[in-house]
Each structure stands twice: as structure tokens, then as C-alpha cells.
Amino acid sequence: MSILLEFEKEMLENLLEDDCLMITSRGMTLEKVVTEFIRTYNAPSNLVFIINASNKETNFILQSLTIGSKPDDFHPRSVTSEYSVNERKKLYLDGGIIFVTSRILVVDMLLERIPLDLITGLIVFKAHKIEDECQEAFILRLYRMKNKTGFIKGFSNFPSAFVGGFSRIDRIMRFLFVKKLYLWPRFHASVNASLGSRAKPEVIEIRLSLSEHMKNIQFAIMDLISMCLKEISKANVSFVVDIDELTAENAISPGFDKYLRKQFDPVWHQLNYRTKRLIDDLKLLGRLLLSLTDDDCITFYKIIKSIRDNIKIDAKVSDWIFWEPAEILFVSSKNRVIDFVQNASDKHIEMNGKWNSFVDIVDEINQEISKKETDTHVMIVVNDDRTILKLQDVLDKGPKTVLNEIYIKSKSILGDIVRTNVQADDDIELNNPPAKRRRTIELDPGIVTLTQIVRHYDQLEEENKKVGQLHLHYHASSEGYLRFEEQLIQYEPEYFILYDPDMGTIRQIELYQACKMSPEQAKVYFFMYDGSSEEQKYLTSLRKEKEAFESLIKAKASMVVPENRDGKTGDNPDLIRLSFTQEVSTRQAGGQQTQESTKQLVIVDMREFRSSLPSLIHKRGIDIEPVTIEIGDYILTPETCVERKSISDLIGSLNNGRLYNQCSAMTRHYKRSIILIEFDQNKSFNFKGKYWGLGARRSETDNLDVMAKLVILTLHFPLVRIIWSPSPHFSAEVFEYLKQDKEQPSAEKAISISQEQLPAEHFLDKYDVGAKNLLLNLPGVNLYNVYAIMNKVKCFADLVELKKDQLNEILHSEQNTNALYDCLHSNLITSCANDQLELAKAAKKSVFKKIKKK
């Protein structure tokens, strides 16, 4: 059992009291409290489901629960698609804690494989993602409709996600069916008291100064970002809801990209090309700002040079390239690489300040632990894996050697700089001091002298006499905070090097100090460029989280919670399904009339439960039965089949031909085949909208290509109908309309239909599809007479033997008869020769006319 601090015990008490939503700051390791809460219910007599948890969260909690447990203890299980139906039923009946995916749980609930009334409770991770149409909200609604006693607990450590929109926190609590809200920011009194009573880590700030060139580049990029934002605001005043948010300070924050999506997705097709290009430019400038402090000067210059070299005169170019700050950006980037101090021969390359400081800090730690007899572990926190590889290279070879290697490899790209400074390479190499290395010395490759070999083995022998060793462990923030927590438990480091600052990581180190290191102090080296965008980004994240909690505290104070919010007592409006039953009237003897209500049913393919449409159909009072069907996604009636396509799926299906095969199968087995093209309700209802999941920007030509393929598809399958839906809500409403006064589908029949089978009762499918398609390609044959031919003629050989009058009796049209008869009986070679003669005559006539005019 892990050690809980005083405020964490208080959080656990909150969870044990009421159904609630708990929101904490980033880095507060909410999973540790959740683990202890789960431990109290980990018994066969309980049945608790944990939903919306990632694989990392699941593995972390499972590993935490196994620490200190006995082999015969009851352990939680994780249910995936690898389990069969019978295996899942057995797991549910055995009880305990079960991690399960939302798709599996909602299907098992609908098919009544789970005893809903026996469920002890539900635990919902990432509660900030709960929306009305999501699968988790569907699960909670099904659960609360049949279980009025079980608990519901929601957790989140993204406070900023609950701010924005109209009463967002209130809506999420309504979907969770909870009445209590617990907020645990870092400035909470209990948190401050708990951490303040223990020793704090010793923090050493390594504040680095930006060079003059870096300052000029940063100011230039910030000016370009501000100018881009002004142009966007000026051109789209009616589309931007909150213009005050379009600032350079917010533009460098991590969530600004999501803000732009939210603002412009619904109106993307109405934006002009210049605005769309400016939005892409903002992303590029943001990446340049990040690269300025992360990369070396040569790598940064290569990025800038590639942007400038890709400018084409006949192409549409970004506006910012021709603005005044852009020239400062290009010139300063070049001068960082080669700076002429006095003359061309006196040259030096600007070094990355963090590299030198990083090597110095590692050497300093090395000296501090030189007399220790135990191993020392150091955690190095960076942004990504690329930085890890670069730092390992810097420690092995030295900063200047690494930079020199990059310079030599980049000669072909640097071009003009290399040509004007040919002698520079030798100067750089000769002026390099000996590289600072790790304690473990490796023999340099290549030719070595006997003295070097003897010296190397002497060093190894001296190293082996020492007991304490320095171990460097790297953590990339992109791997997630749980991975960092696992590394803290595994290595128990005494030193931390925060190469790239991260708010959540700093708080994790605080908690680690309070739990593990107290009263000893962990030593933290905090790297940051003074006055840089890196510092501003870090401070902005702190400010935004504080403002989010302050907003949530005000919302909680003024929140009015209905008594029936939890759905346990009274009538909760969110648990009431719309009544949609089909009235069937029959007249009987004596003039009496009786009415029978038929419950509506829709057959839904299992794979469709990744979308929100099944949830909305169920909410409208229509029962849904999940099964695995081969043809179609939704069976509305015995004769109506629907294939649902999102925009990205539609484009992919049209490109690879899958949609053609699906339409072919649907038309052969169902009288009414429908393609439902469903747009994202948060994006524009237009093919010109921006669909972020498709990757590169799609041009007007791509849009026309999609429409052209759809037209061709409808020509091939004229009986297929297309429904254009702007949102899943509209799709559910259309389904309800299509089912009115119709017979209910059969799940057994839908499962039995496959692409290899052809139903004999369907008059359209008793003929060979290939033969029908061949006939339709002949002149004079259309949809109105193709079945007359197929009914009266056995094969193509018989069709060719028919006389013209016999053919006319079948087609009832002289024009069609002549066209088809001539096609079947004309000599191909003679026809081609006649065509060539006609073309030659026409050419001669045109030449004669020209001569006559002259």
C-alpha cells in the first residue's frame, strides 16, 4: 500500500462519501488516490467497472495494486476484445474490479450480458471528455436507468477543459449523474499545509541568456505571429467569437491550436484562401519558436533556409515571408551560424547554451558523489526522444564536437556560407577543447598508440575500484506523467535535471520529495532561457490553470444542483427516453377497435459503436440490437439497409473501391439501400471544410474529384439513395422518420445475409449482375427495358439471333431497337473503315472551305 499524504487522505475521504466529480491540478498523481479507492472495493462481492482509462493508466493502477499483495489475493482484471462472450460473462459474475473499453461494455449492457442491478459502481477517467453523445454518457445512462443504488465517480486533471462555453461544468456533472464537485488545485490550503510541513527539494535555477541573434530572431517571430493574428482578426471579424484571445501570448501556448479549430472549423468553407494560409503560417511560426531554444543554430538555419528556398514565383506564397521582420529572421539565422567578428578568417559558431550547462551540471554531480559508496540516479526531463538522443551525443563527444559534426554534414545545404568560408572547418576543429565525457571512458575508434591503450586500461582499473556509480535516466514529457511516476518508483533518483520545464513534472517531484525523500532533499536543476518564449510558455500554463480553478470555484459557489440530479430518486429528465411506438389499429366484430403498440427496433453493426449515433437512436426511444452483420451498418426495416460514412471514411472508400462493393451487396439484398454521409457537427456542413484527420490540405480539385466519384457511383446504382446529414442528431431523427409505419427488422435474418448469398424472393437479384451490367452498356438498353430483355431472352447468343421485329416487340421502341440491332450486327472492321472515310471527307471539306475563303 502506497504512502498517502494528509491532503491525499482527505481526497480519499471525499471519494468514499458521495458520488462526485473530482478535478485536480496537473501532476497531482490522481491515480494514486484512485488506486487506494479501488483497493477498498477489490472483492468478489463487488462489481466495479472502470471506463475511459488509457492503457497507461490501466497498467499503472494494476501494477500499483500488485505491490505488496499476496499471490492468493483477488486481483483486478482488464477486459479487451480478445475475451470471448462466455469468458466475459464469467468475469462479470466473478465480481471485483474490471477495466473495460466503452464499446465492449455498452454492447454487453444492451445484450443484457451484465446484471446491471448488481453493479456496485462505475469509475470514469478523463471526465472532461464526457459529452451528451459519447459512449461513456450512453453507458452511464443505461446504468442509472436500471441501477439506482450504485455509485459513480468521475476524475480529471485537466481543469482548463471544464472552462469555456455555457455552464460546461454543470453539463458534465449532469451527464455523470453526480451532485458533488471537489476541486483540488495546487494552491488548496490542505495541499499547501501538507507539503509545507515537509522538506522541500533544493531547486537550482540555471537561467541562460539569449544571444543577440537569438533575441532578434525571437522578436522577429513574435512580430510575425502578431501580424498574422491581426490579419486574421481583420478579415474574419464576424467569425471570431472572442478576438481578445487572438494574442501572441496565447499563440505560443499548447492549447492554441485547439482554440483555432474550435473557432474556424464550422465556417472553414467560408474562409478565403489567405486566411487558411495564415492559420497554417501560425503553426509554422510556433514550431520555429520552439526550435529556436531546442535546436542548435545550424539545424535552425537549415529549417529557415528550406522555407526560403521553397519560394516559387508562380506559386502562392505566404505573406509573412515578404514582411519586414522576416528579413531580420533570415539574416539573424544566418549570422548565428557564421559570425564575422573582425574579418572573414576570424570566425566562430554560436553554441547552444543548454548543452554546455548540461555537461557542466553532470560533471558537478559527478564530483559530489565521487566519495559515495552507493549508486546515484539522476532523472533528466526533456520534451521528446529526439532531445534525448542529442544529449547523449553531447555527453559522449562534447558540445563543440557535436556541433562541428553537424556543420560538416550540412556543408551541401549551407551552400553560400561554406563557399565563402572554406578555411573555417580547420579552425573550428583546432580550437575545440577536449570534450567532457561521462565517467565510463570508451576507447576512441581508429588507430591508437600504445600509451593511449595503457592509459585507458589504467582508467578502467581505477573506475572498478569505486563502488558508487552515476546512472543517468531520461524521461520525455511526450511519454506522459505516469511513465515519469513509474521511473520515480523504480529508480528513486536523488538528482533531477529539468532540461525542458514542465509544470506537471515539477509537481510530481514535489510529491516525490514529500513521500520518499523527506527529510533528505532532492536536488533539482531547472534550465530556462531568461526572457524567452520558453519561459513565457511555462508561465502562461501556470496562469491558465490558476484562472481555470478560480473560474470553477466561482461556478461551484453559484451552482444550483437539482435534487434528482443523481438519478436515484425522482424523475431525471436525462433518463427519460422519447416515446416512439407504432400504433396498429384493427377493426373487430361489434365495431370495437383495439390498439397495439409495437416497439421500434434497429439492428446495428458492432463496429458502429465507435460512433455516437447508436446512443442518440436509443435516446429517441428506439431499441437497438448490436450484432455482427456483413452488409450495411444499420438495418431499419426488413427492406431498408443503411451504410454510414463519415467524410474521411467516404473519401477512403471512394478511392479504394470499397464503397462500390458495399453498394453492390446492398442493392442485391435489400430493396431500399441508403448511403448516410454524416458530417461532423463541429465542422462545416460542406465538402470544402477542413477535416483535420485527413492530413494534408485538400484542394478544390480534390473536392470536385469526390463529387465526381459520387456521381459515377449513383449512375452505376440508380436505386441507391444518399442522405446528407450535418450531425448524428439529424441522422437519428431521419432514422425515426424512415421507420414510421414500417415492419421491424429481424436480427437473425440480418446475420444470415452475406455477400455470397442471393435471396430468391428479390426480383432484382434473380439475374446475373454481370450480365445486367453488360446489357446496360449496350446502346438502346436502359433501366426501363433491361429486365424485359432478361425475362424473354435466355442468353446473349439468343439475343444476337433475334430479328429486328422480334427485338422491337420486346423493347417497344424503334429508336432503341435500331440502336441495339445495329450494335449487335454491324461489322466492326467495316464500321471502323467507314468512320475513317467519313473523317477524311470531313477533313477535305474543311480544307476546301478554307481555300475558298482565301
Image (tube, helix red, strand yellow):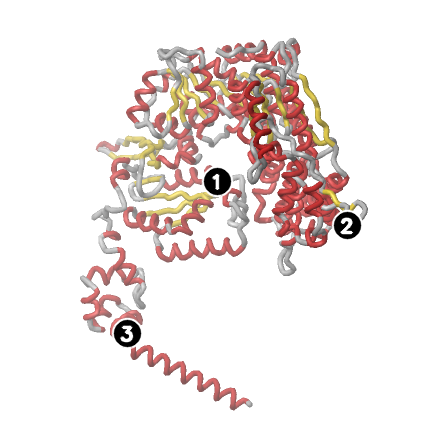
**In the rendering, which numbered label is found on residue 822?**
3
Looking at the image, can residue 363 be seen? Answer: yes
Q: Nearer the viewer, residue 153 or 623?
A: 153
Q: In which quarter of the image is residue 144?
A: top left
1 or 2: mark nearer the eye: 2
Contact between marks 1 and 2 (CB within 8 A): the answer is no
Q: What x and y, as percent, mark residue 416? A: 69, 54
Which residue type carries mark 2? Answer: Ala
Q: Label 3 to label 2, Cα distance in Å?
A: 86 Å
Name the residue that disc number 2 marks: 344
Name the secondary structure under disc 3: helix
Q: In which quarter of the image is residue 213?
A: top right
Which residue type carries mark 1? Answer: Ser
Choose the circle earlier in sequence order: 3 or 2.
Answer: 2
Name the residue that disc number 1 marks: 727
**Mark 3 closeness class: few <14, some 14–19, many ≥20 residues within 10 Å:** some
For this view, does 361 lie left or right of residue 589? right
Which residue type carries mark 3? Answer: Asp
Q: What x and y, as percent, mark residue 744? A: 30, 37
3 or 2: mark nearer the eye: 2
